[in-house]
């Protein structure tokens, strides 16, 4: 779900109605502000074509035993696909086969607190801060002996991908980021927003309370379904699609990681001292120089910044694509062909 309560939050209530773009048919790409058009007709037909990954693998990486799906040839260009909250690896169940068929080695991990991924020690803080998630991604690349990968994501996954590209560009061949530049800081998150913008972050304030933590623990699946509906109001997902992903939220650490993530953003929970230096770098809002395509769905019901507010953060080859046709927040699962195409295009750029 939306993962940026930072400097970009000031732009959420811009002239385009809380940052949402609007269009009717096809998908539009904007390269440094230059629009172009192409058809997105096949999107609705492909979404939901696959229901599962063949099998899951495990590897110890950093503080985690990471569960991940892998498709495609082992000698293919690695692509790391990162999911968001409250979703899971099935966001890429249709994207992965497209990329694998094109010769990519596709790796789709369950983030900390999701699926079969587990902490190696009961004493490790169930930390959801941005630097912790980014170092998880780096540790996974190390564990799999991958020197450089195309990194792509949305929501929490987009923020993680952005950070990896910004701090460790030597490990990131190219970047695809839904909703653009999502790196933030606790200091910037202190700034209040206009009431309508704050309203969109209702769950963040709910999670700041003991009642919210208890409520999320008791009604995790109901909560996630509501978020899916609000964030993708035109996505007509069925029960089977939701239940496949909701099962990943039964991870014993999911609630703790989720609550810590949102409390940390507002300065209501402490992070780990070992991440202090990384957070200082991130608070300076570092630019991203690797080839990048940012994306947005025209029906994204979650808070998100206007593309113009973050375009200058990307200093390398850059393009923004608006995916139309009622595409919401979970863009990879709702528009898998467009997402896979962006990965392949940015890799060739």
Image (spheres, rainbow, N blue to C red):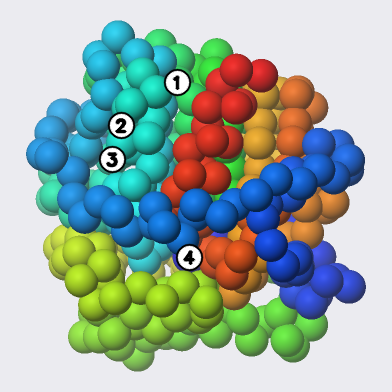
Residue named by callout 3: 109
First reached walking from the N terminus: tag 2 or tag 4: 4
First reached walking from the N terminus: tag 1 or tag 4: 4
Left or right of 43 on screen, residue 117: left
- Residue 152 position, x and y percent, is 49, 37
Q: What is the distance, in whole Å, between disc 1 and disc 4 at their CAs?
A: 24 Å
Residue named by callout 2: 107
Mark 3: secondary structure:
strand
First reached walking from the N terminus: tag 1 or tag 3: 3
Q: What is the distance, in whole Å, between disc 2 and disc 1 at their CAs?
A: 10 Å
Residue 296 at least partly seen = no
Of residue 279 and residue 217, the one placed in the foreground of this image is 217
Q: What is the distance, in whole Å, between disc 2 and disc 3 at their CAs?
A: 6 Å
Question: From the image, which quarter does the C terminus lie in?
Answer: top right
Q: What is the distance, in whole Å, between disc 1 and disc 3 at their CAs?
A: 14 Å
Task: Give the class, few, some or many, for how many residues have Cα within 10 Å of label 3's Cα (few <14, many ≥20).
Answer: many
- Residue at 24% over, 77% down: 239
- Residue 206 position, x and y percent, is 46, 85
In the image, residue 79 sits, relative to residue 2, either above or below, namely above
- Residue at 26% over, 17% down: 73
Residue named by callout 4: 1
First reached walking from the N terminus: tag 2 or tag 1: 2
* Contact flag, marks 2 and 1 (Cβ < 8 Å): yes
Residue named by callout 1: 149
**Which disc number belongs to residue 254?**
none
Of residue 3 and residue 36, the one placed in the foreground of this image is 36
Quarter of the image for residue 333 reads bottom left
């Amino acid at each position: 779900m939306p993962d940026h309560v930072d400097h970009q939050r000031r732009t959420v209530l811009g002239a385009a109605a809380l940052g949402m773009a609007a269009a009717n048919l096809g998908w539009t790409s904007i390269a440094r502000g230059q629009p172009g058009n192409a058809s997105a007709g096949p999107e609705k037909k492909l979404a939901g074509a696959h229901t599962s990954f063949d099998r899951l693998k495990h590897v110890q990486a950093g503080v985690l035993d990471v569960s991940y799906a892998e498709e495609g040839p082992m000698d293919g260009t690695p692509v790391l696909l990162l999911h968001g909250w409250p979703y899971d690896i099935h966001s890429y169940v249709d994207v992965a086969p497209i990329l694998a068929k094109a010769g990519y080695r596709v790796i789709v991990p369950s983030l900390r607190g999701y699926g079969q991924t587990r902490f190696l020690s009961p004493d490790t803080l169930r930390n959801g801060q941005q630097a912790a998630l980014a170092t998880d991604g780096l540790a996974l690349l190390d564990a799999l002996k991958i020197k450089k990968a195309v990194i792509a994501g949305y929501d929490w996954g987009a923020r993680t991908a952005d950070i990896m590209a910004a701090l460790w560009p030597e490990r990131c061949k190219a970047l695809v980021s839904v909703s653009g530049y999502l790196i933030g800081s606790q200091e910037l998150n202190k700034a209040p927003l206009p009431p309508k913008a704050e309203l969109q972050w209702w769950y963040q304030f709910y999670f700041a309370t003991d009642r919210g933590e208890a409520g999320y623990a008791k009604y995790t699946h109901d909560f996630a379904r509501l978020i899916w509906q609000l964030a993708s109001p035109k996505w007509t997902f069925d029960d089977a699609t939701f239940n496949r992903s909701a099962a990943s939220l039964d991870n014993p650490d999911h609630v703790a990681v989720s609550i810590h993530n949102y409390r940390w953003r507002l300065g209501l929970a402490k992070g780990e001292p070992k991440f202090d230096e990384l957070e200082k770098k991130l608070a300076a809002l570092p630019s991203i120089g690797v080839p990048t395509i940012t994306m947005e769905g025209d029906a994204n019901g979650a808070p998100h910044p206007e593309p113009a507010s973050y375009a200058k953060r990307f200093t390398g080859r850059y393009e923004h694509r608006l995916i139309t046709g009622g595409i919401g927040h979970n863009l990879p699962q709702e528009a898998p062909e467009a997402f896979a195409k962006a990965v392949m295009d940015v890799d060739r750029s």
